[in-house]
Amino acid sequence: EPEVTQTPSHQVTQMGQEVILRCVPISNHLYFYWYRQILGQKVEFLVSFYNNEISEKSEIFDDQFSVERPDGSNFTLKIRSTKLEDSAMYFCASSRTSWQFFGPGTRLTVL
Amino acid sequence: GESVGLHLPTLSVQEGDNSIINCAYSNSASDYFIWYKQESGKGPQFIIDIRSNMDKRQGQRVTVLLNKTVKHLSLQIAATQPGDSAVYFCAENEKANSKLTFGKGITLSVRP
């Protein structure tokens, strides 16, 4: 069964450092998403991406965040200068028709 | 603003009993409603969805009910099993492939 994969599973970084979280969506999907979940809280939408451009973003997705689909398979989320409050689980998701399938997540810890 | 919320933070049920998990939403423009299951250390896993033009949809051991009049969504799990223990989230979006708005999540604990 096809699935969304994410790497790394856990990323530890120092405040102010740049991080890149990587995702490989399901191969025939066209819509891609990033969500985050702070420990014990609900999942929050960050950004959606379609046809090589951002289609929607939340207020959380400020200038410190960017997304890219550098090739036909990867989808990345970059945080330029991490803050303590960026510590969370980051989930990538993809969809083709309506159902969004989620990856296992990357746990980001900012020290 | 739009929000999706859950009435109860935890639910404990006896193995074999039926479980009912409830959810309220406030965005009347929502067209899709989805239930996700999240096991520890994993991403949300799709369970079942329902469109706003329906009031009931059944899957394998699960049923989703939608009451648009009171903006209420529920997930019924028949013959709950230990493997059903997880956090359950309701989510909604206004159209296919648009952002999902999640509720806070409810923990389902199944007693053997």
Image (spheres, coloured by chain):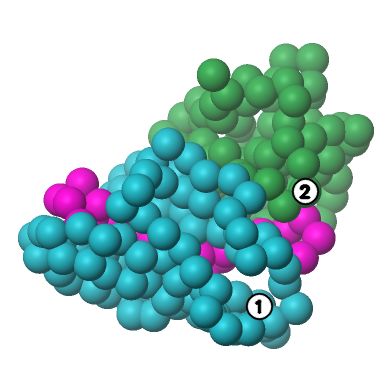
Shown in cyan, the chain is A
The circle drawn on residue A26 is 1
Is residue B30 something one can see in this rendering?
Answer: yes
* Residue B80 coordinates in the image, percent (x, y): 61, 55
Three-letter amino acid code of the residue under disc 2: Ala
In this view, the residue in front, A93 or B104, is: A93
Residue in view at x 63 percent, y 20 percent: B26
Residue in view at x 72 percent, y 52 percent: B97
Residue in view at x 31 percent, y 52 percent: A64
**Secondary structure type for disc 1:** loop
The circle drawn on residue B96 is 2
Residue in view at x 47 percent, y 54 percent: A35
* Residue B61 coordinates in the image, percent (x, y): 75, 56
In the image, residue A51 lies in the stretch drawn in magenta: no
Three-letter amino acid code of the residue under disc 1: Ile
Residue lying furthest right in this view? B53
- Residue B2 shown left or right of residue B66 in the figure: left
**From mark 2 to mark 1, how far is it between C-alphas?**
17 Å
Is residue A4 something one can see in this rendering?
Answer: no
